[in-house]
Image (spheres, helix red, strand yellow):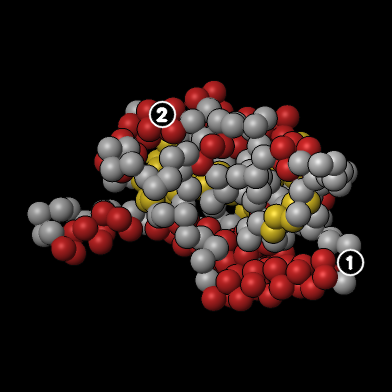
Amino acid sequence: MFIQVLSDGYEGVDMDAATELGIRVSNSPGDITQNADSVAEYTVLLMLATARHLSVALASVHDPSIVKPGHGGSLMGAKVCIVGIGSIGAKIAHRLLAFGAHVTAVDRSPTRAPKYIPTSPLDDLKKAVADADFVVLSVRATKENTHMIDADVMSSMKKGAILINIARGSLVDEEALCHAIKSGHLGGAGLDVEEHEPVPLDDPLLTLPQVFITPHEAGLTDLNVRGTVEYALSVLANIKANQPIDSQLNNPVPRRVSLSN
């Protein structure tokens, strides 16, 4: 048996259970399917939309009683810290450098980062985000990093900083985020993911004009859909030919089936 996940993330699969049941699991690497390119483009969109108060600006067009926002922040000259400099993080960094941003990163394996991106170990997270105008989350979600961006980390971020999350909602303590924005410590947040999806209509983050929320759609482009389908077909072809799968995530022992009556 085989499970092919049609995304780079695979936290929805119980890997221990699959391995125990003899089921092989494979994901769809973003650098191959071009999900990484799609998400990187969307990250820039979220950064600009949040920094330029786009939600309020759009609302003011439809309702003249809403005061349009004043000046917003620019990416030119901004300091950006990317948390997780894998395939998506590296693509984000490449695009931000073209905007004239100053990019640093933090990662569990700093040596995998592009040589032109100063990268700190994850243990230095609070120090790494302290001077950033934007903190961008592009790290894989695990049980160990649930709410890695908590009240303590947010308090170490500079006043007015913006949090961007295009990874997984479980990475952020949303109650702490709401408090940090309401108190004025953080300038806002751009979120394509939340801990509970679809986003509940009573989510307090929806009431904050400083927060720009989209429905987990960063990777939904023609480029990524085509690349994902082509990759899945190539995996199926390899299985049929009894060839190894480069993206296989586990190594289960095939289960023996009893043929007794």
Q: Amino acid at mark 2?
A: Glu
Above/below status of 245 relative to 199: below
Above/below status of 157 relative to 221: above
Identified at 26% across, 54% down, the residue is 56
- Upstream in the sequence, badge 2 or badge 1? 2
Taking 71 as reference, is 151 left or right? right
Identified at 50% across, 25% down, the residue is 151
Circle nearer the viewer, 2 or 1: 1
Q: Quadrant of the C terminus?
A: top right
Taking 41 as reference, is 198 left or right? left
- Count of numbered tags: 2
Label disc, if present, on residue 175 of the rendered structure: 2
- Tell which of 166 and 67 is nearer to you: 166
Residue 62, horizontal then vertical, whole percent: 16, 63
Above/below status of 258 relative to 2: above
Label disc, if present, on residue 85 of the rendered structure: none
- Say what secondary structure mark 2 lies in: helix
Q: Amino acid at mark 1?
A: Asn
Q: Residue furthest top?
A: 152
Q: Quadrant of the N terminus?
A: bottom right
Label disc, if present, on residue 242 of the rendered structure: 1
